[in-house]
Amino acid sequence: MIRYATMIFSMTKAAKFALIAGPLALGGYGVARNIGKLDNVYGPGFDWQLAHFLGLAGFLLFVPLVLGLRTLLPSGTVREVAIGATLLGLATSIVQFGADIVEAFMAADKEELRSLQHRFSGLPGVQPAIYDFGPLFFFVGIVVVAVLATKAGRLPWWSPVVLFLGVLLPLLNLDLMPLAGLMMLVALLPLRRTFRQVSAG
């Protein structure tokens, strides 16, 4: 029992940190990407790597946040499916950003970077799993999780609405990622008090 309580406390502590750092890192990815594109030679290079390291950090930070959210929701099939789908989307996004970082380290110029990207995405199943459909599970899943948290009284009614609009923006135009990160932060920020109460309890 003590071991279980300690595990929940540690998970909640990590989730509380990720609640702020995750959306900020994703927003930071968008800022670095937009600045890097200003000279029309974005990637490979410092601006590309900075943007992708921030994006990778953002998706990694969402893992403890999603696991922390799981402890706040009533048990059931819907919860497990929503959490599983969100984590699956995070896993594919992490692979995508990790591959982009490795490929950029290997590439001498933009043309070679594109060649390496096409070589990776051309592997059987990679394009649909890692680029086309896989990451969508995160964007859809996190909204469903927010809806479940609202039904459980953990989030206000407007949080899933703001979160939905936030995750929709980069799907429409990736240049809107800075605003998307900010909206995700605003939508999820009310959880900070809940995580604090769980830690205190």
Image: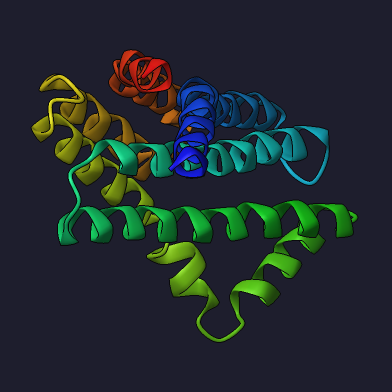
Q: Quadrant of residue 67?
A: top left
What residue do we see at 13% from left, 25% from top?
Answer: 153
What residue do we see at 54% from left, 33% from top?
Answer: 10
Q: Is residue 25 left or right of residue 161?
A: right
Q: Nearer the viewer, residue 74 or 137?
A: 74
What residue do we see at 60% from left, 38% from top?
Answer: 55
Q: Position of residue 113 (x, y in %)?
A: 76, 59
Q: Is residue 111 left or right of residue 162?
A: right
Q: Position of residue 81 (x, y in %)?
A: 25, 61
Residue 41, visible in the rendered structure: no
157 to 137, vertically: above or below: above
Where, quadrant-wise, is the C terminus in this rendering? Answer: top left
The single residue placed furthest to the front in the displayed view is 1
Q: Position of residue 25 (x, y in %)?
A: 57, 28
Q: Quadrant of residue 14?
A: top right
What residue do we see at 81% from left, 63% from top?
Answer: 112
Q: Is residue 145 left or right of residue 121?
A: left
Q: Nearer the viewer, residue 6 or 148?
A: 6
Where, quadrant-wise, is the N terminus in this rendering? Answer: top left
Q: Position of residue 46 (x, y in %)?
A: 82, 34
Q: Nearer the viewer, residue 9 or 134?
A: 9
The single residue placed furthest to the bottom in the displayed view is 124
Residue 78, visible in the rendered structure: yes
Q: Nearer the viewer, residue 20 or 178?
A: 20
Q: Is residue 155 left or right of residue 175?
A: left
114 to 71, vertically: above or below: below
